[in-house]
Amino acid sequence: MAPPTRKSFPLRLDPALFAALERAAATDFRSVNVEIEVLLREALGRRGIKIAPAEPVRRGRPPKETTDG
């Protein structure tokens, strides 16, 4: 199964804002990217905008392929 596609785009942030995001992400043991997604989902939820839950990321090694025969 192919991993879900993600939209990537450049994002320019004030250095102080990025530093605050880094601190918040480190506190929650997340990457800055995931921290931004979490904060955006929370903000949109407070505005009443519904978003489908994120697909869980599969971690670890892929299963071994078996050969028959």
Image (cartoon, rainbow, N blue to C red):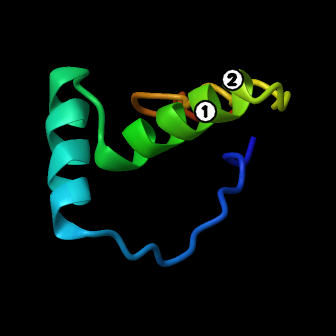
Residue 14 relative to residue 64: left or right: left
Do the residues bearing badges 2 and 1 touch, measured as CB atoms within 8 Å? yes
Q: Position of residue 33 (x, y in %)?
A: 40, 49
Asked where in the image residue 9 lies, by quadrant, the reply is bottom right
Label 2 element class? helix
Residue occupying the point 30% across, 41% down: 31
Residue occupying the point 45% across, 73% down: 11
Q: Is residue 58 above or below residue 35?
A: above
Tag 2: Cα neighbours inside 10 Å, few (<14), some, or many (≥20)?
A: few
Query: Which numbered dot is residue 43?
Result: 1
Tag 1: Cα neighbours inside 10 Å, few (<14), some, or many (≥20)?
A: few
Q: What residue type is disc 1 on? A: Ala
Q: Position of residue 47 (x, y in %)?
A: 75, 30
Query: Which numbered dot is residue 51?
Result: none
Query: Which numbered dot is residue 46?
Result: 2
Q: Position of residue 13 (x, y in %)?
A: 33, 69
